[in-house]
Image (cartoon, helix red, strand yellow):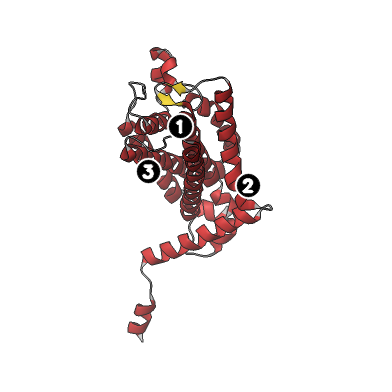
């Protein structure tokens, strides 16, 4: 009898994967069902905003920026920062949006953050396929000169978004007003990450301060990966970006462990 009961006991990792799968499907269905033609709007909004910026730069006859085609330069920068922003802002609200699920002991607050960040990463991949596929049909060369560098940079930016979301999801639960601060800093962070103007144009004394922003390193690295002729800023460091990401993830996980009871009960 005892042996039979032990056989029915699932390993912790199988429970975790089952929870993540269920949460992923729940989050996906929620995002698709909140408004009519949900899947169309999820993909159309980021594609339309990036296409508009490309159109503006095309109208002013700016074909090449810092040694790389303008369309590729804009798509890589805007899509990369959009991935970070959505992973960060969506995952930071995951705990407050899924409080009712914490009645199930298998579901932990950190699970909701991890799953929501994964969903945003998946959606970013779909948007990227649409954008770069359209660019290829238009006749642009979308094949990266260094595919591994592009993938490494994308992964790094995704980890930054996850780490940010892990930390802030706890902070805004304890101090709700912090959510307003996050919303305020996202716009200037977009600008100083080099999404719509080249960072090499900034004087070195100021650029060194701007490059404390790890997202800027990810955007610069992706552009270098797409074109070996791209004139990246000398402060570019993949190691710095990954170091920041791992530190943020570590502190985010520590906050979830420290305040798990309050996240569930408050």
Q: Where is the N terminus found, in terms of image quarters?
A: bottom left
Q: Secondary structure at mark 3?
A: helix
Circle 2 residue = 41
Contact, CB < 8 Å: mark 1 with mark 2? no
Q: Give the alpha-carbon distance from disc 2 to disc 3, as whole Å.
A: 34 Å
| N-term mark: 1 or 2 | 2
Q: Give the alpha-carbon distance from disc 3 to disc 1, as whole Å.
A: 33 Å
Residue 243: % across, % down: 33, 36
Q: Is residue 166 above or below residue 100?
A: above
Circle 3 residue = 250
| N-term mark: 2 or 3 | 2
Q: Secondary structure at mark 2?
A: helix
Residue 145: % across, % down: 33, 34
Residue nearest the viewer, comparing 248 with 187: 187
Q: Secondary structure at mark 1?
A: helix
User: Is 157 on the left or on the right of 186, as rendered?
Assistant: left
Circle 1 residue = 72
Residue 176: % across, % down: 60, 41
Residue nearest the viewer, comparing 250 with 123: 123
Q: Is residue 129 above or below residue 32?
A: above
Q: For the point 45% across and 22% down, which residue is it?
A: 64
Res 255 seen here: yes
Residue 235: % across, % down: 34, 22
């Amino acid at each position: 009898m005892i042996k039979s009961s032990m056989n029915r006991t699932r390993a912790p990792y199988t429970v975790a994967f089952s929870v993540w799968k269920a949460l992923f499907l729940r989050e996906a269905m929620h995002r698709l069902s909140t408004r009519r033609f949900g899947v169309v709007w999820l993909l159309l909004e980021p594609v339309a905003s990036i296409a508009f910026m490309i159109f503006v730069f095309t109208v002013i006859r700016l074909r090449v920026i810092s040694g790389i085609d303008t369309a590729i330069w804009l798509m890589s920068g805007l899509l990369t920062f959009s991935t970070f922003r959505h992973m960060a802002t969506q995952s930071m609200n995951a705990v407050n949006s899924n409080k009712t699920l914490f009645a199930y002991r298998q579901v932990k607050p950190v699970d909701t953050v991890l799953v929501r960040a994964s969903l945003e990463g998946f959606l970013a991949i779909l948007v990227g396929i649409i954008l770069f596929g359209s660019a290829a049909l238009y006749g642009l060369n979308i094949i990266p000169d260094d595919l591994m560098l592009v993938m490494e940079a994308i992964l790094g930016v995704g980890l930054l978004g996850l780490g940010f979301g892990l930390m802030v999801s706890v902070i805004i639960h304890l101090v709700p007003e912090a959510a307003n601060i996050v919303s305020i800093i996202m716009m200037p962070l977009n600008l100083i990450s080099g999404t719509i103007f080249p960072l090499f144009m900034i004087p070195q004394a100021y650029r060194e301060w701007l490059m404390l922003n790890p997202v800027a390193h990810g955007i610069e690295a992706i552009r270098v990966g797409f074109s070996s002729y791209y004139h990246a800023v000398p402060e570019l460091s993949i190691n710095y970006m990954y170091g920041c990401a791992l530190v943020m993830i570590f502190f985010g996980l520590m906050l979830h462990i420290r305040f798990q009871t309050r996240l569930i009960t408050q």
